[in-house]
Image (spheres, helix red, strand yellow):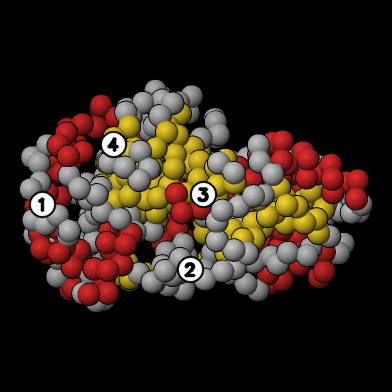
Amino acid sequence: MPCTPRAEFALPHELAQERQARWQVQRERLAASPFYQQHHRDAPLRLPATLAGISELPFTDKEDLRRDQAAHPPFGSYLAGAAESVTRLHRTSGTTGQAMNLALSAHDAKLQAEVAGRAQSAAGLGPGDTVVHCLNYQLWMGGLTDHLGLEATGAMVVPFGAGATELLIRTIRELGINAISCTPSYPARLAEVLAEYFPDIEPKSLGLRKAFMGGEPGLDDTAFRARLYDTWGMRAMNSNYGVSDFLCNFAGQCTEQNDLHFVAADVALAELVVPDESTVVPWEAGSDGELVLTHLDRECQPLLRFRTGDLVRLTATERCACGRGAPRFKVVGRTDEMIVVRGVNAFPSVVAGAVNACPELNGEYRIRLLHPPPYDRLPLEVELAQGHEASDALCEALSRRLGNTLRLGVALTVLASGTLARTEGKTRRLIKEYA
């Protein structure tokens, strides 16, 4: 089935009939899935006739998929269809475990691009814009798949990829590019190259007025966005939230507010559950929980109650000022990135907000864990902003201010601007330097 036209503008109850129709088809795919009927730990699964019964089914998690794909290469027994139906293969980075092969049919690829286009359109990309796409075009989902989502908005897309930043600057100037698709940390690298090779060009004069970002924590912080606007004159939008195993991009901020619209309600079912438990959290504004997702329309590798590991807060379910009925949420953190310091939970996204609130700092930071927990203080490396120099008094003041904001002890290391490595791809903010 094709995507529902303008589904992101419908309220959830207005899509009920459409969602149920998709589930009838998806139920047959899952009923034929060797993974869910033979290899899942709770197999065989009895699938409900209506969506209301899905909350009674068992979960699927990343480790289930890793084990299954290792036992049934290359796509796992959760492929659910013939290998001939796969028209595109992507691969995860494998930075937190075994790299995974991701299979898409032609139908899956088209649906994914349309849903991603909804998120990018909500953030303000469309006809008349020229956007340069600066994510890795190799096996990673973020390159080609996100490119097609950008195209779905009607914008002209320049497929640049990662690296060659000097050439990127020349390309932006020559083509009059007004928008960029990249990670939140990439503008820092772009500024370094601009200063080195084009010292007479101010970032604002490069002409980038829109930025469409995702893939790293801290992007929801208004101080970070204000810093980008002051430096570049561009409006940074959180337009690209997704889960590679599920949909590469299914949520984005609109131009009217700061939260993420869940724009895939016609093709995906979202739930909230208590982390590390099976208890379902009510789907209502103010609820917090781990995001759990079920495909309602997926030919290759359909997933049932997939635990994403993302902790989110549902902020609104009524219609937005932008006209969209898609529910809104914030990403609080990840279950595998939570650091407990003397009983206080800390996430990189929260740390980013605290760092960005300090005018003496430039926003770059790393949490460097040298040993397994427990932790008495949060080991945090930060960079000074241009024009500031380290002193005992400043370091003490920053440590106290960050500690008070985060409500925990901080072992602070203050570094000169430019000390921490910049990257063209995703920047790792949490680094574990132990086995």
Residue occupied by mark 4: 279
Q: Earlier in the sequence, mark 2 or mark 3?
A: 2
Q: Earlier in the sequence, mark 4 or mark 1?
A: 1
Cα–Cα span, label 2 and label 3: 17 Å
Residue occupied by mark 2: 95
Type of residue at label 1?
Leu
User: Is residue 287 shown left or right of residue 354?
Assistant: left
Whether residue 45 is visible, yes or no, is yes
Cα–Cα span, label 1 and label 3: 32 Å
- Answer few, some or many: residues within 10 Å of disc 3's Cα (few below 14, many 20 plus, some between 14 and 19): some
- Relative vertical location of residue 162 with respect to residue 360 in this rendering, above or below: below
Residue occupied by mark 1: 45
> Label 4's element?
loop
Type of residue at label 2?
Thr
User: Is residue 114 shown left or right of residue 257?
Assistant: left
User: Is residue 290 shown left or right of residue 278?
Assistant: right
- Relative vertical location of residue 209 with respect to residue 145 in this rendering, above or below: above
> Label 1's element?
loop
The spot of residue 77 in percent (x, y) is 18, 68
Nearest to viewer (mark 2 / mark 4): 4
> Label 3's element?
loop
Q: Earlier in the sequence, mark 3 or mark 4?
A: 4
Type of residue at label 3?
Met
The spot of residue 392 in percent (x, y) is 90, 50
Which numbered circle lies on residue 338?
3
Which numbered circle lies on residue 141?
none
Cα–Cα span, label 3 and label 4: 20 Å
Nearest to viewer (mark 1 / mark 3): 3
- Answer few, some or many: residues within 10 Å of disc 1's Cα (few below 14, many 20 plus, some between 14 and 19): some
- Answer few, some or many: residues within 10 Å of disc 2's Cα (few below 14, many 20 plus, some between 14 and 19): few
Cα–Cα span, label 1 and label 2: 32 Å
Q: Residue at x 79, y 48 (%)?
A: 361
